[in-house]
Image: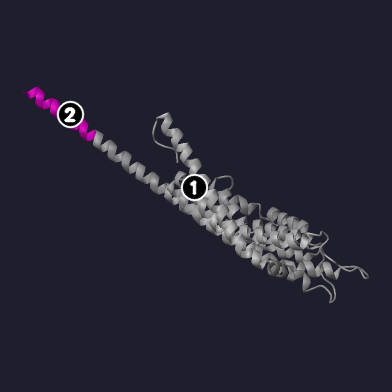
Amino acid sequence: MATSSNDPNGQEMSFIAHLLELRQRLLQIVFAVFAIFLVLISFANQLFTWIAHPLLRFMPEGTQMIAIDVASPFFVPMKLALVLSIFISMPIILYHFWGFIAPGLYKTERELMLPLLVSSIFLFYIGMLFAYFVVFPVVFGFMLYTTPVGVAMMTDIGRYLDFVLLLFFAFGITFEIPIATILLVWTGIVTPDALIEKRPYIIVGAFTIAMFLTPPDVFSQTLLAVPMWLLFEVGVFFSRIIMAKKQQREQEEEAANRSTDLATQELSALNKELAQLDKKDQSKL
């Protein structure tokens, strides 16, 4: 991305141009988030009802969620609409991120990074959907099932939203495990064989993490730990394919370099022979 000019003024202008490009892309991202927010703000209350459905479906009849703060009924749905605007804008955000860094990457790096960026978006969304449709019913059902007799579970809407967003983010990040695995292998930090050797420790680590993110029952812990382990296996599988292609490319480049060196040596030898012939001709004359 740096300019090829050796003039200090040229380099300064290039740096300023990059800053201007970054500023323009950030403004476009903010505009996109704000535009989506303006659309969602009209449906803020309906969105909160949809988010609260996994809890409301298990609550006894006659009970409901509460708002402790006076302004919570207004600000909590607005906060949800803003966060959803950012989540929905992730493709736009990553598009501008890619557009900014792509010119500074090598061709092989661009071939790897672009699929990883696209995959990371889908995996994050899949993690959120998994949390909503699979984890939330188990977690909230367990919490209401274990509520002591005589205790009415009346959840504050603000605290509920914070808890839900935390789980959304946690599961979205968890589903990025294949991307993290591929990057670790591609950068040479670890190898697929080394990860396979550490599989028992990784499985134990998955269940340990699930123990802190889910209620203390085996079923809900398994719902998180098993996908984490399977996602790790997916990452190892694709990392093997990527490393095989990388090694094949390196071998092809090495063979091409050898061919180039051999051709250079042959050309050099031919030039020497021609020079010797010229000297012989000149000596005869």
Near-viewer residue (264 or 175): 175
Q: Is residue 128 above or below residue 23?
A: below
Q: In this rendering, would 206 be left or right of 3?
A: right
Q: Nearer the viewer, residue 218 or 194?
A: 218
Coordinates of residue 63 in the picture (x, y in percent): 84, 72
The quarter of the displayed image where residue 88 is located: bottom right
Residue 66 at x, y = what percent? Answer: 82, 65
The residue wearing badge 2 is 275
Badge 1 is on which residue? Answer: 100
| Residue 54 in sight | yes
* Prevailing secondary structure of the magenta residues: helix
Disc on the earlier residue, 1 or 2 = 1
Q: Write down the quadrant of residue 221 in the picture.
A: bottom right
Q: Amino acid at mark 2?
A: Ala
Residue 149, given in percent of the width and then of the height, sits at 92, 70
Residue 275 sits inside the magenta stretch = yes
> Is 69 placed left or right of 197 in the picture?
right
Span highlighted in magenta in the image: 269-285
Question: What residue lies at 35% left-to-right and 45% top-to-bottom?
Answer: 256
Q: Quadrant of the C terminus?
A: top left
Name the spot of residue 144 as percent of width and height, x first. Answer: 84, 69
